[in-house]
Image (cartoon, rainbow, N blue to C red):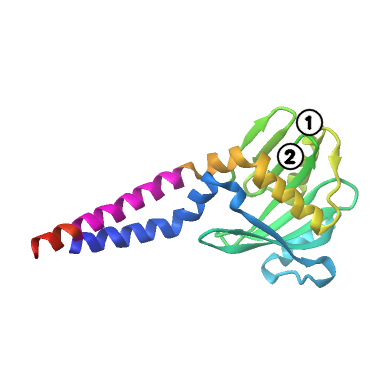
Amino acid sequence: MIEAVIFFVLAAGFLSVFAWRAVLFIAPGTARIEVETPADATSIPPELDDAWAELKKLGFVLLGTHSEKFWFRAPVLFLDGVHETEPIVASLTLGKDEQDHTTLWTMSDRGFVITANFKRPSREDAGTYLAGSIDGASFERLLKVHTRRLPEIGTAQRLDTIEKRVDAARTWFSKSGKPELRQQHALALLWSIGAIGMVCAAFSKLWEIFETTQ
């Protein structure tokens, strides 16, 4: 009985951490991206106030907020802004380290350029997809690096409304981002399979106990 309980507890712990990521690996299209507030109804969260102030100095204006919802995980809220003259969107959220996680996005008919100030997978498909990160970079450096790479994906689209920003995110999850999501969450799938195996082992132990008591 004790072994079965241990298996159940371990499985529950692993699934609580990894299940949502395993689902993203198998079915990235299950992500739900929704508009939350337009610019005129958006209040800057206090924890992102300093980061947004720095982006404003670099020429970004507020678009609003959007949420990204995944199975088995609480929704994540993003604060979005667009550069006044460049086709670049900045999305901010609060990371687990209690620091801002800022990602710069540019979309064209070919694909995406994505640059983040925190650790995230890097991937390059010449002319169609360029993703990378500079952990802890200043916003000015992040913007310079991102801007230099824009010509590599051709003519960029200007995502100047929160609705366009959300549509771009949906495109990324359903198409361009699939290989990156699978790269990022492959290990989570293995841990989730292992957790399901623990559940099966726990039921097997309980069945053995049941049979011996008959």
Q: Regarding mark 1 in the picture, which secondary structure is present there?
A: helix
Q: Quadrant of residue 199?
A: bottom left
Which residue is painted at 75% across and 55% down in the image? 166
Q: Residue 49, relative to residue 154: is it above or below?
A: below
Q: Which mark is residue 152?
A: 1
Which residue is painted at 80% across and 58% down in the image? 162
Label 2: few (<14), some (14–19) or many (≥20) C-alpha neighbours in 10 Å: many
Q: Is residue 199 magenta?
A: yes
From the image, which quarter does the N terminus lie in?
A: bottom left
How would you classify the magenta stretch by its main secondary structure?
Answer: helix
Label 1: few (<14), some (14–19) or many (≥20) C-alpha neighbours in 10 Å: some
Residue 5 lies left or right of residue 208; in this view the side is right
The amino acid marked with disc number 1 is Glu
Residue 184 lies left or right of residue 166; in this view the side is left
Q: Regarding mark 2 in the picture, which secondary structure is present there?
A: strand
Residue lying at the far top in this picture: please name it: 126
Q: Is residue 190 visible?
A: yes
Which contiguous range is marked in magenta? Answer: 187-206
CA gap between label 2 and label 1 equals 9 Å
Q: Residue 2, relative to residue 198: is it above or below?
A: below
Between 201 and 9, the one lying in front of the other is 201
Which residue is painted at 63% across and 35% down in the image? 123
Image x and y of residue 15, in percent: 41, 57
Q: Which mark is residue 65?
A: none
- Give the residue at mark 2: 113
